[in-house]
Image (tube, helix red, strand yellow):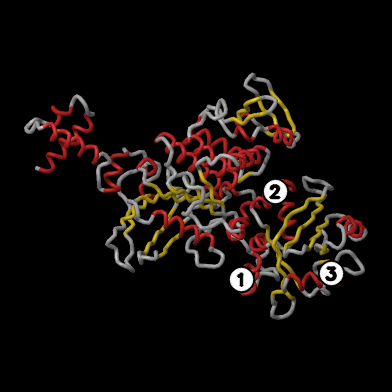
């Protein structure tokens, strides 16, 4: 790089600044463009990097300014910009280390994707040098902890408070260095996230949870399951967990895992009452809420647009692209059965057959059902997809509501889950056949494994419970008689739940047989026949299962 970056404001063009700089510096250049919205954009030219002599634009970034006086007070953005404007009256730029400025600065990327893209374009070593040159706080903390800008603990805390403006940046502050080192996959696999959630409802009931998740290699310890009877507080727990996570920047958050993003999934009403509203500020931080049920119309178009965005993107988390995460998730249930979109010229296109052309990523290739291979510019492919036909299997409108819910979950989770996300699912079993519940949970676990994220699921279904290990099951024992100020009992089960029989899970979790009502109907049927003294197995053997007869016999023996 040059000895120091240079500042310029957008009153001058980048080309003018570059022309003036060529007379100044012969090799590497770093130009920081100060915008009008309290962010900046950095332009790098690194001749020995992968890009050669091409410019690379990085940003926008958060930036804060620290005065060089003894108190090292924080400078307002508008004041710093005014000073830079004053110092660039005669020249288009001013060196960032100029004593005439009277301040230093610190920057930070807004998203994990920005850091990954920088590393991909210029290489690890050049990316690190570039980040250190613009005083990136993640790089400084790791490689130059004694630098003037951050060595003072008190000043460093003030800088962090000023520069970290989203939950994703809060996550990056502690975990972003592994992205810069290209060690993200190993860091994801080694992490054991944990956090606490406590709250009190208006009726006085108090709740406390300690969520401890295992490494990604564990069989079923990335998903915490909340289960209990209606009114026990499952939904309220999801809502308060979301509120606490979204407020992690300003309120106390307890745990080694501060989620980068919060993503909610529900099924049913058009507007969810489970999750906090999606305000603009929250959405900027990556907060999303999705309905797994198909709503038709605009919603179908939005689903297709999200899918097409995945197809044309090379964005990755660790070493897996978002499109690969989607295909992996779909295979949990669909195996080799196609998921298709409709092309105006070629008809149904199985999305698993689509690939980006390596030599020119603006093109994609895909095979037709006839076996013919097509190469097409991505933008043309995008324009040729009939959004009105939605996503389907072999032909339009051939998916069940459960299949649609499963596919919607896979598409939206692959598109928006970032490293360190918190996924919250409210009763995902609605509309789903037991087989699809198992597939959905498998897809969820795969998304969490590939992205280093965790999930909390509220459910009534024993089929969901049997997809996680027993220490991840939280049984909420809330009853109407709880007094204000009392903590609700949240229990764990000693039963090995992973892969267990759903009847046994119901017995252990709810303290009742899943077939209790059916058994009582059968007993009433015998009573109505008036065959007292006739053994149940004799009266029922021609019309009910042997399993139910066995339950009735065992129940009678216990009651003697």
Total numbered badges shown on the rendered structure: 3
Q: Is residue 75 left or right of residue 349?
A: right
Q: Is residue 40 left or right of residue 480?
A: right
Q: Is residue 39 left or right of residue 277?
A: right
Mark number displayed over residue 157 = 1
Q: Are there few (<14), some (14-19), or many (20+) residues within 10 Å of tag 3?
A: some
Q: Given this view, does label 1 or label 3 mark the residue nearer the observer? A: 3
Depth order, front residue of 130/488: 488
How far apart are labels 2 and 3 at the CA level? 31 Å
Choose top left, top right, bottom left or bottom right for residue 97: bottom right
Q: Mark 1 falls on what kind of element?
A: helix
**Quadrant in the picture for the C terminus:** top left
Depth order, front residue of 6/275: 275
Q: Are there few (<14), some (14-19), or many (20+) residues within 10 Å of tag 1?
A: few
Q: Mark 3 falls on what kind of element?
A: helix
**Quadrant in the picture for the N terminus:** bottom right
Q: Earlier in the sequence, mark 1 or mark 3?
A: 3
Q: Earlier in the sequence, mark 1 or mark 2?
A: 2
Residue 173 in sight from this viewpoint: no
How far apart are labels 1 and 3 at the CA level? 28 Å
Q: Mark 2 falls on what kind of element?
A: helix
Taking the view exactly as shown, the residue that stands out farthest to the left is: 533
Q: Residue under circle 3?
A: 85
Q: Position of residue 261 (x, y in %)?
A: 56, 54
Q: Earlier in the sequence, mark 2 or mark 3?
A: 3
- Residue 208 drawn above or below residue 123: below
């Amino acid at each position: 790089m040059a000895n120091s970056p240079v500042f310029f404001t957008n009153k001058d063009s980048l080309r003018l600044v570059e022309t003036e700089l060529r007379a100044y510096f012969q090799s590497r250049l770093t130009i920081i463009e100060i915008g009008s919205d309290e962010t900046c954009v950095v332009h790098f030219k690194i001749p020995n990097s992968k890009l050669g002599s091409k410019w690379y634009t990085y940003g926008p970034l958060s930036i804060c300014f620290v005065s060089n006086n003894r108190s090292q007070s924080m400078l307002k953005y508008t004041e710093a910009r005014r000073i830079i404007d004053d110092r660039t009256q005669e020249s288009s730029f001013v060196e960032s280390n100029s004593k005439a400025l009277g301040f230093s600065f610190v920057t930070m990327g807004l998203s994990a994707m920005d850091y990954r893209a920088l590393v991909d374009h210029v290489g690890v070593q050049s990316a690190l040098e570039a980040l250190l040159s613009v005083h990136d706080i993640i790089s400084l903390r790791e490689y130059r902890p004694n630098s003037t800008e951050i060595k003072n603990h008190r000043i460093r805390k003030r800088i962090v408070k000023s520069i970290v403006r989203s939950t994703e940046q809060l996550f990056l502050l502690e975990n972003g260095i592994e992205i810069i080192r290209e060690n993200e996959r190993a860091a994801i696999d080694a992490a054991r996230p944990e956090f606490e959630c406590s709250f009190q409802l208006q009726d006085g009931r108090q709740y406390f949870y300690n969520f401890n998740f295992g490494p990604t290699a564990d069989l079923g310890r990335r998903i915490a399951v909340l289960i209990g009877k209606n009114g026990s507080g499952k939904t309220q727990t999801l809502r308060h967990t979301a509120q606490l996570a979204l407020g992690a920047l300003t309120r106390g958050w307890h745990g080694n895992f501060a989620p980068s993003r919060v993503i909610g999934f529900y099924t049913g009403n058009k507007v969810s009452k489970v999750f906090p509203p999606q305000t603009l500020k929250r959405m900027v931080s990556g907060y999303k809420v999705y309905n797994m049920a198909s709503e038709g119309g605009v919603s179908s178009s939005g689903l297709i647009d999200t899918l097409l965005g995945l197809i044309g993107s090379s964005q990755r988390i660790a070493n897996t692209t978002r499109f690969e995460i989607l295909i992996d998730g779909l295979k949990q249930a669909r195996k080799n059965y196609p998921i298709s979109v409709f092309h105006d010229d070629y008809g149904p296109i199985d999305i698993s057959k689509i690939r980006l052309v390596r030599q020119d990523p603006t093109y994609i290739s895909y095979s037709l059902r006839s076996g013919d291979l097509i190469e097409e510019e991505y933008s043309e492919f995008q324009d040729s997809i009939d959004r009105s036909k939605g996503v389907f299997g072999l032909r339009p409108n051939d998916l069940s509501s459960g299949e649609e819910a499963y596919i919607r979950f896979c598409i939206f989770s692959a598109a928006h889950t970032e490293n360190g996300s918190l996924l919250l699912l409210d009763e995902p079993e609605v509309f789903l056949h037991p087989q699809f519940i198992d597939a959905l949970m498998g897809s969820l676990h795969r998304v969490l494994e590939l992205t280093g994220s965790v999930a909390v699921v509220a459910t009534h279904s024993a089929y969901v419970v049997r997809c996680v290990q027993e220490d991840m099951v939280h049984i909420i024992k809330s009853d109407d008689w709880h007094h204000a100020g009392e903590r609700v009992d949240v229990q764990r089960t000693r039963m090995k739940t992973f892969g267990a029989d759903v009847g046994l899970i119901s017995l252990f979790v709810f303290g009742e047989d899943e077939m209790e009502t059916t058994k009582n109907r059968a007993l009433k049927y015998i009573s109505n026949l008036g065959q007292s003294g006739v053994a149940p197995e004799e009266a029922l053997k021609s019309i009910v299962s042997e399993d139910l007869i066995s339950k009735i016999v065992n129940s009678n023996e216990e009651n003697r």
